[in-house]
Image (spheres, rainbow, N blue to C red):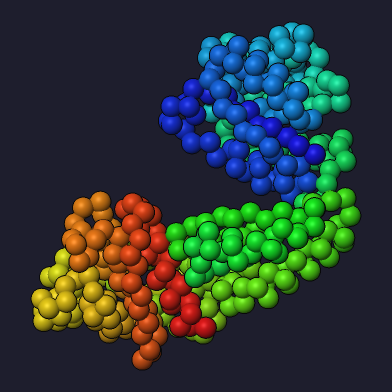
């Protein structure tokens, strides 16, 4: 069963508002066995909304529309859909009571708010318990179009409580199962070459997707069919073949972020961690502390951007900095030792490099990053040399640092 999402609003197209609704809807619909094949964003223009709706209704059985349901003049979705489906707006006393309840004590009732009770005549109208904009459910030729508010909290509420249950009841949806493996030590093209024979031989109901991130690759297996047990059996069989092919290069099978994997291991072993960061600017510390409960194992960080701070707080020797430079294996080794000593932790990671876009030299071009991880008396280092732009260089260094630490802790 396939669906299409249409998001309406000039603010989405000029980048003033980020469309988080579509990603959420895609995830939840997939769980219900409904695959989103396209997401389209259009301006608040009647002809553009109509064209997008007409195209979608020709392609799929389910069209989900968000946005343009407010009380102001630029919100034209309801009237446009009335024209498309050959109906008109009528006043609904039931919706008006809901509008009064939602606004009570917060916003005074006026003509604009009262207009929220004007709904398409020939459709199923569903009240929105957390907002004033109601939901319109249209049906034509066994196809469904649902128009919902664009406010994320309102959309997620009506989707979870009303729309998805109704869609599952109306349509015979497939079973969709995903399994994600996170892989290290491979460029995407090299990994694809290694897996080519296995991938070509996959059953028709199972597909493989490559989802690269800086320094790691996620492999997502998707199984689809009517019989859950049959799909699961085939998925398990192919997953076993993949594990045989890649062995220890698969370090996670639940698509868990590295910072959570590291945090879980630290808690299990009752260990503490710190970071000493130069080019990554504290981003590794931010990732580790983004996890609820991280205060159990994270003690602190030193963002040592200058050599003076590296010397004063991390005890990197002047001789090392003068002879080897800030971007060197020797420096990150002294930084990681200094972090463990200064912050009194069991383990630590350190980074020092040239994130770019400037600052590189012939000997140390942009993208050069030295990374160290230490646990007790063992230290591992690596040199990162690929330049993919400042943001990606930093993210890659963070991933590599956490991977080094994860390997040490295991």
Comparing 75 with 13, the one in front is 13
Residue at figure coordinates x 42%, y 69% from the top left: 400
List x then y, in percent, for residue 224: 79, 51
At 49% from the left edge and 73% from the top edge, which residue is drawn? 262
Question: Where in the figure is residue 338, as x and y percent of width and height?
Answer: 25, 81
* Image point (72%, 58%), residue name: 200
User: In the figure, residue 282 lies in which quadrant?
Assistant: bottom left
Q: Is residue 317 above or below residue 12?
A: below
Q: Position of residue 288 (x, y in %)?
A: 43, 67
Query: In the rendered image, which quarter contains the N terminus?
Result: top right
Can residue 313 be seen here? The reply is: no
Q: Residue at x 48, y 36 (%)?
A: 18
Q: Of residues 143 and 218, which is closer to you in this image?
A: 218
- Residue 146 horizontal side relative to residue 72, left or right: right
Residues 151 and 130: in front is 151
- Residue 64, percent from left and from top: 69, 30
Vertical relation: 377 (above or below) 168: below
- Above or below residue 110? Residue 397 is below
């Amino acid at each position: 069963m396939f669906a299409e999402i249409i998001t309406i609003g000039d603010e989405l197209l000029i980048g003033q508002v980020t469309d988080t609704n579509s990603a959420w809807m895609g995830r939840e619909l997939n769980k219900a066995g409904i695959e989103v094949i396209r997401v389209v964003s259009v301006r608040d223009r009647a002809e553009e909304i109509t064209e997008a709706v007409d195209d979608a209704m020709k392609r799929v059985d389910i069209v989900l529309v968000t946005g343009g349901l407010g009380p102001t003049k630029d919100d034209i979705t309801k009237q446009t859909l009335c024209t498309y489906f050959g109906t008109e707006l009528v006043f609904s006393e039931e919706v008006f009571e809901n509008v009064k309840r939602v606004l009570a004590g917060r916003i005074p009732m006026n003509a604009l708010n009262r207009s929220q009770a004007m709904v398409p005549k020939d459709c199923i109208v569903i009240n929105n318990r957390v907002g004033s904009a109601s939901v319109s459910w249209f049906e034509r030729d066994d196809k469904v179009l649902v128009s919902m508010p664009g406010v994320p909290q309102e959309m997620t509420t009506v989707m979870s409580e009303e729309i998805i249950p109704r869609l599952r009841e109306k349509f015979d949806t497939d079973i969709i199962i995903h399994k994600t493996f996170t892989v290290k030590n491979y460029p995407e093209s090299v990994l694809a070459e290694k897996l080519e024979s296995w991938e070509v031989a996959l059953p028709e109901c199972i597909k493989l997707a490559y989802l690269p991130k800086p320094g790691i690759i996620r492999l997502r297996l998707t199984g689809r069919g009517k019989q859950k047990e049959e799909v699961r059996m085939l998925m398990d069989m192919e997953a076993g073949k993949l594990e045989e092919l890649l062995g220890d290069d698969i370090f996670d099978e639940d698509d868990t972020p590295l910072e959570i994997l590291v945090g879980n291991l630290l808690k299990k072993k009752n260990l503490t961690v710190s970071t000493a960061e130069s080019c990554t600017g504290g981003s590794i510390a931010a990732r580790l502390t983004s996890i609820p409960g991280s205060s159990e194992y994270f003690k602190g960080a030193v963002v040592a951007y200058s050599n003076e701070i590296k010397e004063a707080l991390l005890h990197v020797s002047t001789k090392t900095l003068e002879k080897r430079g800030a971007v060197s294996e020797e420096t990150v080794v002294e930084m990681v030792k200094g972090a463990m000593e200064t912050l009194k932790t069991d383990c630590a990671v350190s980074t020092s490099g040239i994130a770019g876009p400037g600052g590189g030299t012939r000997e140390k071009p942009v993208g050069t990053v030295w990374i160290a991880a230490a646990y007790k008396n063992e230290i591992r280092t690596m040199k990162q040399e690929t330049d993919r732009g400042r943001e990606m260089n930093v993210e890659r260094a963070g991933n590599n640092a956490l991977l080094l630490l994860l390997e040490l802790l295991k």
